[in-house]
Amino acid sequence: MTRPKRLRRRLFQILLFTVYCPLSTLLSCSFEITASRYALVYGAQDYDARPPSTTSDLAYTDDDARDFGSALSAVGWIVTITQPEISKQKILDDIAKLIDKVHGDSTVLVFFSGHGTIYNGNPYILPTDAVTSTGTAVPANFLSPSELQAALDALPCRNRILILDTCYSGGFVTDTGTLDAAPQDFGIYDDGTDGSALLAAMGSYSDLLAAAFDSYDPATPMVVTAAGSEELSYESATYGNGVFTHFFLEAASRGDLDGDGFVTLQEAYRYARASVEKYWNSVYIGSADFLPRISGNARDVVIF
């Protein structure tokens, strides 16, 4: 993949402005601060996989978990942090344990930083028990979007949020009520010269925005992912975190885009996406580009 020419890049920036300004205007009118907020925060680091396995230990996912948990605790979330070893069953059990704690006005957030994969054409996140010490994959311990969705659906609360810092995590975004889920990798990675992808995206924007409201369902989880469904995500010694996680957390102090004293999920996402583009993609042109994604209907909740 190659970086588009400067003119195409400018067209893409105009498109982003066209897409996000109306949506952000609508969202700024209504967001929620729920009385009880629970966060399950996971940093999968010690995979203990040896060659020839391609699933290596990670360096900063435990830091992601600690830093993310600390940022949420500082603003009143009830946080449970698990790192550096995590099983699939623990994640599902932790979510299930919240069923008796949450109520209609509660918010539950699940954050996972670790490996992600595509297996038999489908996306998964990998808890540390997804691979053995001899490098053998254990597909039964891969965590799929449908399994995670079912666990979140069982929670009797208004807001469910899923934030993933993994490779291929865009495969977890929902396919209703979202602008980003539909064109997973449009425009910025297209190396054509006629701008057809951009024009098509602009032409379909009104339909996508209408779908976001027509398909509104308060039970649909809000999902933010570090990367697209066909993209890798990265961690960096420069930041001491996953790149996406670093900028999402930085939004806590710099992401209040409307100056109302709160940072919502939409604001944190927009800040992180713009920062990844400016401070990461502009350096690793083409070779390590990725962009965060978001889905979950046209609604918003306060994160920080």
Image (tube, rainbow, N blue to C red):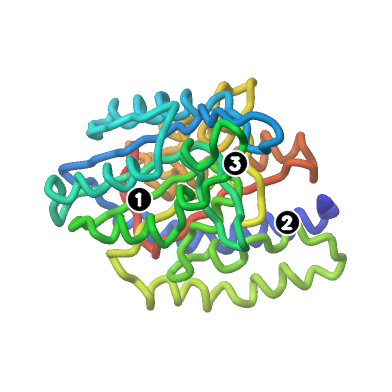
* Rendered location of residue 101, percent (x, y): 13, 45
Find numbered disc 2 in the image and state the secondary structure of the residue it sits on: loop
User: In the picture provided, is 304 more to the left or to the right than 280?
Assistant: left
Quarter holding the C terminus is top left
State how far apart marks 1 and 2 are (Cα).
27 Å
- Residue shown at the point (30%, 56%) measured from the top left: 151
Q: Are marks 1 and 2 in contact (CB under 8 Å)?
A: no
Asked if disc 3 and disc 1 are in contact, CB closer than 8 Å, the reply is no
In the rendering, at what x and y percent does residue 215 appear?
Answer: 38, 75
User: Which label sits on residue 136?
Assistant: 3
First reached walking from the N terminus: tag 3 or tag 1: 3
> Viewer-nearest of labels 3 and 2?
3
Q: Give amino acid for label 2.
A: Ile
Q: Secondary structure at mark 1?
A: strand
Q: Earlier in the sequence, mark 1 or mark 2?
A: 1
Residue under label 1:
161
Query: Relative to 181, is 88 above or below?
Result: above
Q: Does 170 sit above or below residue 116?
A: below
Answer left or right for 131 relative to 34: right
Q: Which image quadrant is residue 278 in?
A: top right
The CA distance from mark 3 to mark 1 is 32 Å
> Contact, CB < 8 Å: mark 3 with mark 2?
no
N-terminal label among 3 and 2: 3
Residue at 79%, 58% (x, y): give it.
Answer: 8
Amino acid type at image mark 1: Ile
**What residue did someone put label 2 on?**
188
Q: Looking at this view, is 128 or 3 the one in front? A: 128
Q: Position of residue 105 (x, y in %)?
A: 16, 53
